[in-house]
Image (tube, coloured by chain):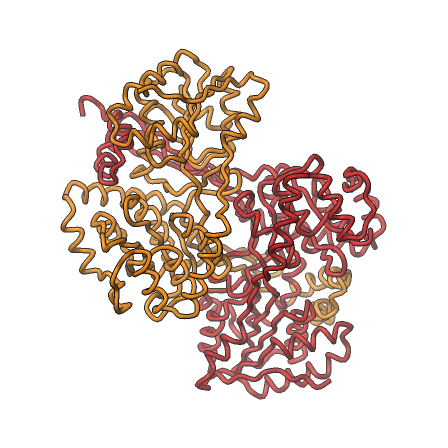
Chain colours: A red, B orange
Amino acid sequence: MNLNIRNFISSSDDFRSELDALLAWDSVSDATVQKSVADIVEQVRLSGDSAVVEFTNRFDRRQVVSSSELEISREELALAKDRVSPELILSLEAAAKRVYDYHERQKQPSWSYQEENGTLLGQKVTPLDRVGVYVPGGKAAYPSSVLMNVMPAKVAGVGDIIMVVPTPDGFVNDIVLAAAYIAGVDRVFTIGGAQAVAALAFGTETIPKVDKIVGPGNIYVATAKKMVFGVVGIDMIAGPSEILVVCDGKTDPDWIAMDLFSQAEHDEDAQSILISPDLDFIKAVKLSMERLIETQTRKDIIKVSLENRGAFIHVKDMDEAMDIANIVAAEHLELSIEDPEKWAEKIRHAGAIFMGRHTPEALGDYCAGPNHVLPTSGTARFSSPLGVYDFQKRSSLIYCSPEGASELAKIASPLARGESLEAHAMSAEYRILKDD
Amino acid sequence: MNLNIRNFISSSDDFRSELDALLAWDSVSDATVQKSVADIVEQVRLSGDSAVVEFTNRFDRRQVVSSSELEISREELALAKDRVSPELILSLEAAAKRVYDYHERQKQPSWSYQEENGTLLGQKVTPLDRVGVYVPGGKAAYPSSVLMNVMPAKVAGVGDIIMVVPTPDGFVNDIVLAAAYIAGVDRVFTIGGAQAVAALAFGTETIPKVDKIVGPGNIYVATAKKMVFGVVGIDMIAGPSEILVVCDGKTDPDWIAMDLFSQAEHDEDAQSILISPDLDFIKAVKLSMERLIETQTRKDIIKVSLENRGAFIHVKDMDEAMDIANIVAAEHLELSIEDPEKWAEKIRHAGAIFMGRHTPEALGDYCAGPNHVLPTSGTARFSSPLGVYDFQKRSSLIYCSPEGASELAKIASPLARGESLEAHAMSAEYRILKDD
């Protein structure tokens, strides 16, 4: 199949503006979506269960009568697990264990130290009490996302993990429920869309109010999450998935072709970019792609995303490749090159760095250990993979000795008066020791 | 002066609903503000400097002709510092040092580990490239906020720190500029409002585009920050400041009165609450307040905030006080009690915990070391004080050995096929070693 993929040359005058145009992604939801989501959120906030049931019946074409029908018990999760093939269950369990083990290294302890005069300073680190995990239903139902969103919360010690997953037309995905069972989700409700986000944010008679909502969703879910941000915490709003493969031309072109496909097959907006200093290699990868795409069940999606948003970038050398990678700040950066650790030192911005010829993104998506929830659309410039730190929070600790307080008060008092905050000054001055 | 402050008794039937009503705070900006901010943000995005100059002249009543007039050079910051009293400069320098030292303990290193088969996993931790710090101008100009927002970024190793501060009618606050000089801000621009947030988020010919915007501001600033969230990172949107003082009745009532004032004097929406099991002590604090308020230059603000949003809560015992503190999840929690460390163990949610009778909030506001940018309005349930971690981000590291990749591919393949992602499966399967 002929593939019409953009070719860029880094030495071209227009390269930077072409690159910016390639990377541009506008995730803003339009006014209609905004209005519709605002209405749903407000009705769920005011009417609770009755609104949730009404929206669920309307949008998911269900016939729920009582809100109690919305919950899936742990026994039902176990039954769903029994319906999944043993091979798949073993893989889920192995993946869950690896993800758990990796994330245990992220858990942060409380800390404190004492100054000479006895004053204690530090931070107390505690898990969130209760978290909501949104899991999309229907065709894009990913059991791996259940593991990736739930395991860091488990490691953090979150008390209560509430999962919501829509079941349009009553369709239930057994693998997703099996993953919820294996991950140790506390309660599961079959709701989705903006109504599920609102129910988790404000709580209803049936759905417990949570402290933070994580997990991917469509534009309605994303808009609702942004709307309730502040009432609860949220994770990043994800854009389409992207991969940037840097190859020195010495990896099997078929491997690189398939690595690019594995991103492109997600959806029509996904982005796959290959950078190489070897023009013949780029051509070889293109030929591999044109041959291999015929074998792909999702070839229509792959073709659209490659032709709309994919690109080959021919660069001068590896240093320039790293500069471009830092501009792109890709969600997934694959360094399919010799001595990848050395080159990774030059990378400042990336969600995840896959090093070497034997580390395709797909391994990280499922079971290597690191999280597959990663910052997209260049947001790796300022944000991080989902992690245990997203499910822990901190309280500053200050315990002044009388001597310490007296010294600090003498610093604080002029500063407070400089800000015309007299009560602050006096509150500090009361703690100055008489004989000081 | 007579003070009409609410009295609650925890044993009352209505207590929980009364408490919820007391704590309720609606920070939603109205449609007019939304529309106005959206217009400003869009115009700055499209027209850059010319829009920034136009809005600055309009809203801050200035006569800027060229955008170059918007920058304050480091030499001018040094001159401003020379105009501030030496005592205040010494306090600023002492505070900056203490804040820096405390935050150094928050800096997180990269980490990695190797599995038996040679596969390497970890996280690379890097500072943000460039950060914008918003500093309010006019009457609520707080040099301490400059230190608290800038020092953690310095500790993180942020390359470029850009400060914006509006100068309405051309009024420049020398102490704020001195704090910027001492903190080591890289560039300062005299712009504010939504136009400053938009300029930092999108960049203009003069104002550099940043990766994250932090710092407090009015409703226009907060709305603009929420609007550009995703294009850049932002810190939490702060609500009004609050303090919850728990006292066993054995601290000088004047001290507690002044600690409550120090919060109430911020603005009319600030919240000061005292919890005690000792009713006579509550009465004594009230008498202290009625006497001491006469001495306060900001007594009108203090009176309004205490009467609108303040409260005394009489509880059964200290255990119940801790339960209520966890419900409130206060920005500032003062445990003015015997054995405060023991009781602090029961606290799950608070921005900062001030322990003992000699640790008033005012010391933490200025110079104890911990950050004074703290989660408000109960958001301590899911968020943390501003810290070095807000200026660092993480990239996952995965480097599979051929043997490790081969093992992982056998786990990933069935999972990918279970999600109907065939290219993921094939990309993984290519890495299964032939003799495995």
Q: Does B108 sit left or right of B120 as displayed? A: left
Considering every residue shown, the one lying at the far top of the view is B280
As rendered, which of B397 and A78 lies closer to the eye? Answer: A78
Q: Residue at x 37, y 35 (%)?
A: B268
Locate residue B167, reporting x and y percent: 27, 54
Q: Residue at x 22, y 24 (%)?
A: A433
Q: Does A271 sit left or right of B185 as displayed? A: right
Q: Residue at x 70, y 47 (%)?
A: A164
Q: Does A9 sit left or right of A186 as displayed? A: left
Q: Residue at x 37, y 55 (%)?
A: B193
- Occupied quadrant, residue B158: bottom left
- Occupied quadrant, residue B338: top left
Considering every residue shown, the one lying at the far right of the view is A83
**How many callouts does the rendering have?**
0
Q: Does B207 sit left or right of B378 as displayed? A: left
Query: Is residue A404 visible to the viewer in this orientation of the structure?
Result: no
Query: Is residue B335 visible to the viewer in this orientation of the structure?
Result: yes
As rendered, which of A371 and A142 lies closer to the eye? Answer: A142
Quadrant of the snapshot with the C terminus of chain B: bottom right
Q: Is residue B232 above or below residue B279?
A: below
Locate residue B347, reporting x and y percent: 50, 30
Locate residue B388, reporting x and y percent: 40, 49
Q: Is residue B159 above or below residue B378?
A: below
Locate residue A379, reporting x and y percent: 51, 62
As rendered, which of B59 and A303 lies closer to the eye? Answer: B59
Q: Is residue B90 above or below residue B342?
A: below
Quadrant of the snapshot with the N terminus of chain B: top left
